[in-house]
Image (cartoon, rainbow, N blue to C red):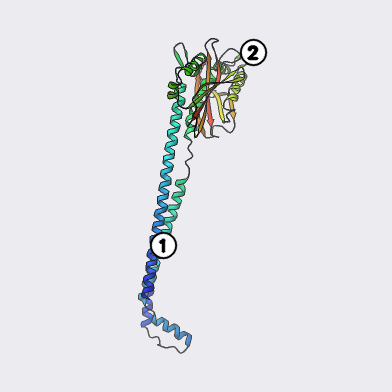
Amino acid sequence: MKNNKAQIQIMQTVVVLLLVFVVLFIGFIFAMTQEKRATQRQLQQLLVLTEQKKSQSINYLTEFNCIIDNVIIKDCFDKLSIESFKVRVKEDNLYYGSVLGTIKIEIEENIDGELSRNIIFENKKEVFETIKQYQLPISLYDPIKNIKNNGVLYLEIYN
Amino acid sequence: MECYILKSITRIQKSKIPKKSKIFGIQKLYNNFLAFEPRKLTFSRKAQAEIVGFIIIVIIVVVGIMFMLFMNKDDGIDNKSNLFDSQLSQSLLNVISRTQTSCETQLSNIIADCFEEKNICDVDSCELAKEELEKVMQDTLILWGKPFHLFATQRDLNKIDLINGECDHFTEKSSSGYIFISSEEYDVVLSLDICKN
């Protein structure tokens, strides 16, 4: 009888220990999942910030900006400056590659209802995991004709 | 309560009940009753305590699982779209204000004239402003499938109101922007709300 009772008690202890380990294991898995999620979120935030930085730097690049009467106009690109930038990029792709990173900058212009696209910079990564596409409305200023057309700045960021 | 029961049982045992009953069934019951030991009730207390402990463990486990389920829920914050949309509405308003129309004047001037009830190019300025705004929106937010609410107000007067998709004052916004257009009397406020899809 005493043997049986002892066996039962041992079994009880074993079950309790087993339960404790199971609970600890579940807790560990939960903690690891939370940690992984937090890291992923931080990574995503960092990525978004980097992309935002890139888009901001492009928006404020003096190579593109419209300057009228010595005033820089926001969200406005000068068409002549863009053409000159394209020539400069061909000569020195390395510098702009390091400043802008792996990115494709495209401008769509609306001229009297007709849309035309123009690639102004392309530094494509051969192997990439994701492409993020963003679009930003801009004005395109023609200093010769002194007119502003509507356009869209398309960014493709390779990661 | 248990104490009261125990006391009454012992009182009954001590009372003058005949030790053996002549009827068999009752006698067995009576013998069992005599063999009853109040001290054995401690075992039932232990069982109760174990049940209570078990229930507490179950409650803790359930609470833990609920906590895990709630924590695993995605917060649903899309930082990317928030950051870019906030820039988008203001940039678009800047572009709108500079847009040159077929009447050789900027769209912002036409919007201001709309509140002064003037005609431009022999056309009602409000109608012309709406037409030009629709053109700009067609190439941008409508093309990108973003619901928006664009409206121009001067004090409490609202003369231009464009809505695409489900987007009104009560819908959740991803971003809002506004610009002031100077007018003869009061400034006109052109506002753009981009709503969440």
* Chain bearing mark 1: B
Residue positioned most to the right: B122
Residue B166 appears at what percent x and percent y?
58, 33
Residue positioned most to the bottom: B22
A16 with respect to B101 (left or right): left
Front residue (pair A78, B83): A78
Quarter occupied by the N terminus of chain B: bottom left
Residue positioned most to the top: A144
**Disc number placed over residue B88 in the picture, else none:** none
**Quick check: B63 above or below A119?**
below
Nearer mark to the viewer, of 1 and 2: 1
Residue A81 appears at what percent x and percent y?
49, 15
**Quick check: A47 above or below B99?**
below
- The picture quadrant where one finds residue B51 is bottom left
Q: Residues within 10 Å of mark 1 (few under 14, many from 20)?
A: few
Residue B1 visible in image: no
Q: Circle 2 — which element?
A: loop
Q: Mark 1 is on which residue type?
A: Phe
Front residue (pair A25, B139): A25
Front residue (pair B119, B193): B193
Residue A52 visible in image: yes
Q: Residues within 10 Å of mark 2 (few under 14, many from 20)?
A: few
Identify the residue position indicated by label 2 in the image: B122
- At a point 38% along the width and 70% down the height, the residue shown is A7
Residue B134 appears at what percent x and percent y?
60, 23
Identify the residue position indicated by label 1 in the image: B54
Q: Earlier in the sequence, mark 1 or mark 2?
A: 1
* Chain bearing mark 2: B
Q: Mark 2 is on which residue type?
A: Asp
